[in-house]
Amino acid sequence: METARGVVLATERYGSAESWKYFAKDAVMERRRDGSKCESRGNSIVGAFKSVFLPQGYPESVSDDYLQYQFWDTVQAFSSSLSGTLATQASLKGVGVGNQEATVAAATITWLLRDGTGMLGRILFAWQKGSKLDSEAKKWRLFADVLNDIAMFMEILAPYFPACFILIVCTAGIFKSLVGVAGGATRAALTVHQARRDNMADISAKDGSQETLVNLAGLLVSLMLIPIVTDNPILTVSLFLLFTVLHLFANYKAVRSVVMETLNEARLSIVLKGYLRDGRVLSPLEANQREPVLLEFRKTVPIKLGVRLQEVVESPEDLNLALKENNMPYLLGVRNGCVCVCLGPEASVHDEIRAMCQAVWLSSKLSPPTSRDPPTQSNWEMVHESHKMMDTIFKPFLKGVEAAGWDTTRTLLDWDEWRVEWKTKNH
């Protein structure tokens, strides 16, 4: 193509940024930006900001929900930074900063006790809940921030209860250690979701840059706040409550903006129940909008995945009942008020999804309000019915799930590590 500048030899573009053209004129090749000078200056500023604070290749290299999540994450980080300043000031006052009667040894012991109990809490929490943080990243992310606000509020109140100061700050230290584990682990899980080019390290590094910039802004605002709130407990608590409300609201909006395409128990339950109700498979966006992000305490029949055989059957007769109508590499049973699933070593991801679908159906049949009426079937009869139902609906359901945009090559279902090989009735 020939223009006034010469013949266009080639056009190049860096990601989704502005394009450049190569012109040939009088046997000379010239490279020029495509666009006006005004646009170029604006683009250069925006481009510099993107290269510093956004992952390479943005927006193609990240998930569609990346920008919305990062916006709300920035708001919550800023408000948390200001709340943290108020809490730190109260902690320093509590250990004796500014008090001539306080000793360095007493302050050091208090600080060491707080850090030590926090370390123990971190280890215990990671042991008990580590495997849950992947499958329920949104819930634990929000839980971590709520617990962080509670811990900071305790630190602010601690100086006004000198007799219980050490107990309060140690408890707050334990809470903050739980926040460190839950917040860091769930952030890593969300980073895996956001990465579209296996660029987790780049996304994590740029997230660190964004957080540093926000903390720097929070530091500057804190320098203006500290002289105002010093020796003014009412203003301190009032500002803390204001920042906390903003922090929790921003966190809720952040986790609500995440649209995960992998199935966990909550999302699979929502999709399956919608399919059984109206024959339509919900898209990831629809299911994520309905997914609960708060830790729930309602009475439902729990589901245990990847359990030992003795948690499903307790006799050879039970094993025969578990194998009835079942040609799949897993066993289901209802024992001790739980739906238990025993998985075979050859089970595929699709088998895991099918097993979870059956467990969800059984749980919903056994949970209130459905279970208020006297049961007309035994537990094993319901298990057999679930096998027959899955034989009918699972293939079209799975096809619809894949067509709706869900990733069925992996799941975020909380399977334990037990795998069992059993003898069938034909052996």
Image: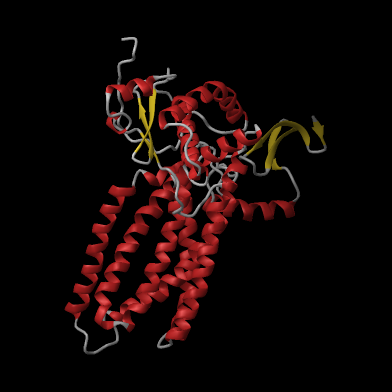
Q: How many marks?
A: 0
Q: Residue at x 53, y 32 (%)?
A: 407
Q: Position of residue 70 (x, y in %)?
A: 54, 54
Rendered image quadrant of residue 226: bottom left
Q: Position of residue 171 (x, y in %)?
A: 29, 67
* Residue closer to the observer: 239 or 353: 353
Task: Name the outermost residue toward the top.
Answer: 426
Residue 280 appears left or right of 137: right
Q: Position of residue 100 (x, y in %)?
A: 24, 89
Task: Name the outermost residue toward the right.
Answer: 4
Residue 3 appears left or right of 212: right
* Residue closer to the observer: 201 or 94: 94
Asked whether residue 279 appears in the rendered view, the answer is: yes
Q: Position of residue 221 (x, y in %)?
A: 50, 75
Asked whether residue 26 appears in the rendered view, the answer is: no
Q: Residue at x 49, y 74 (%)?
A: 241
* Residue closer to the observer: 325 or 181: 325
Q: Quadrant of the C terminus?
A: top left
Residue 25 appears left or right of 160: right
What's the coloring here? secondary structure
Rendered image quadrant of residue 103: bottom left
Q: Quadrant of the N terminus?
A: top right
Q: Above or below — where is 138 with respect to 176?
A: above
Q: Above or below — where is 291 with respect to 116?
A: above
Q: Above or below — where is 294 with respect to 189?
A: below
Q: Residue at x 24, y 63 (%)?
A: 117
